[in-house]
Amino acid sequence: MDEKLAIYGGTPVRSVKLPGPYPGASVYGKEEADAVTEVVMRKSPFRYYGVDVAGKARDFEKMFRERHARRHALACSSGTAALILGLIAVGVQPGDKVIVPANSFYATAGAVTMVGAVPIFCDIDHSMNIDPEALDRLIDPLVKAVVVVPILGNPCRMDALTAVCKKHGVFLIEDAAQSCGSSFRGKLSGTFGDVGTFSLQLNKIISSGEGGILIMDDDSYFERAARFHDQGSFREKSRLPELKDRPNQYLIGQNYRMSEVAAAIACEQLKKIDFIISRMRELKSRIKGAIRPELEEKGVEFRTIIDEAGDASSTIMMYFPSPEKAEAFHDALIAENVFCSHLYDRKPIYAAPSLLGQISAYQNRFPFSQLTGKDRVEYHMGMCPVAEDLLSRNVMIPLAPAFTDSDAEDIIRAVRKVANVILAE
C-alpha cells in the first residue's frame, strides 16, 4: 500500500468512496418496496380514511409499543414533531424552562421554543451525553422538564438522570432520535422517562425518509399528543375505551400525522432493527478493536460508552489532542475515500446564530422575552465548557449494516495510514 497520504498526492486506500452511512436505508429491499406498493395499489395513502386503508400506521404503532413495552405509541411526521408532541403531552407551557443538552441537533432546542418554552443548555460528559451532575445543579423552580438525548447510539446514564428528575419533580423526556434500539442495563432507550421520542429520518437507525414516533404509558399524555397531532381531533377513541368516563381534552392542534406510505416502510424497517444493530456492533467491535491501541498511544481518546452491551454502535467517535489535529485527520481520511465527519461542525447547539442571538420568528423575541429580570436567560460561548472542548476535537466514523468485511478492513487501513502521518507531525 502506498503510505503517502492521498491528501499529499498518494494513492487512496479505496478507489471509490464508502457507501453513505445511512443504517436503515442501506438495507432497503423488496420488503419495503412491496409494502409501499400495497399502499399505492389500495389508493389509500392517508391513515384515517381512503378507498381501502391498509392500516400501516396503526400496525407500526402496535409493533413499536409492544417492542418497547409501553402502553401507547403515536406515529407522526418527523422526530421533531414527536418531540413537540411529547412536550405538549406532559403540559409544558409558555414561560417554562426546559433543560436540553449542549450537544444535540438544533431540533431539540427548536422543539422547546415551538411550545413557547425557553431552552436551558446543560453541559455534557465524556460520553457526549448530558451530565447528570451538571443537570442537578442547573434545575430551578421554573424548569418544567428535562430532555435527554442519547447521542449516536450511546445510551445515557439513565439511572442517575431519572434520580435527578425525580428529586426535583420535573418531567423526563427521552429524545432517542438517533438511538432507537440502544439500551441501558437491558432496558431500551426511550422507556425510562415520561415520554420517549424517536426519528425515522434518513440518517437514523431505522428510516422511512421522514417520520417519527413517541411512546408513553399515561393515557392523558397520549390523548393530548394524539389530539394535537391531528388538528385537535381524536379519531380512535377505541384506543382509550375509558375516554367516555372523563372530560375530553379538547385543544387546538396541528397536522403532524404520519402517512401510510411512510408507515409501510417503517414497519419493514422495524422488523430489521435487530439485524441492523447486530451488524453495526460487529463492525464497530472489529474496527475499534483494531485501531484503538495505536490511536490511544498517539494521544487520541475514544468516547466513553455508557453501556457497551446497549450501544447501538452506529458511530466510532474519537477526541484528538487538538482541534487542528482533528481537522487534519478528518481531511486526510476523507481523501482516502473513507467517510468521516465532525459532529455538529464541532460546535455546541447554542452556537447556532439563531439560538445564540435568541432570534425567533416573532418580533418580540417570543418565547425568550417571557423571562425578564432575574429570570432572564442569555446564552454565550463558554457556558458549557466540556461540550465546547470535546466537540472542537471530535472526529466520527459512521457505520452502516451494509458495510462489508472488506469495507471494515479498508477503514482500519485508512485510519492507521492517516494516524501514522498526521499524529506524528
Image: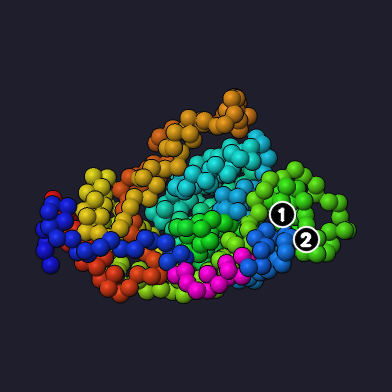
Q: Position of residue 397 (x, y in %)?
A: 33, 59
What secondary structure is marked by label 1?
helix
**Rendered image: mark on residue 425:** none
Real-space CA distance between mark 1 and mark 2, rounded to the nearest whole angstrom = 9 Å
The residue nearer to you, when weighing 340 against 259, is: 259
Asked if residue 348 lies in the magenta stretch, the reply is no
| Mark 2 residue type | Glu
Q: Position of residue 250 (x, y in %)?
A: 80, 47
Q: Which residue is mark 2?
A: 236
Q: Residues within 10 Å of mark 2 (few under 14, many from 20)?
A: few
Q: Classify 169 as above or below 374.
A: below
Residue found at x 16% / y 56%: 6
| Mark 1 residue type | Ala
Would you say 182 lies left or right of 366 here? left
Q: Which residue is mark 1?
A: 226
Q: Classify 77 as above or below 30.
A: above
Q: Are marks 1 and 2 in contact (CB under 8 Å)?
A: yes
Instruction: Kindly tell me whether residue 132 is visible in this rendering.
Output: yes
The quarter of the picture where residue 402 lies is bottom left
User: What are the residue bounds of the magenta stretch?
Assistant: 27-40
The quarter of the picture where residue 289 lies is bottom left
Would you say 15 lies left or right of 1 here? right
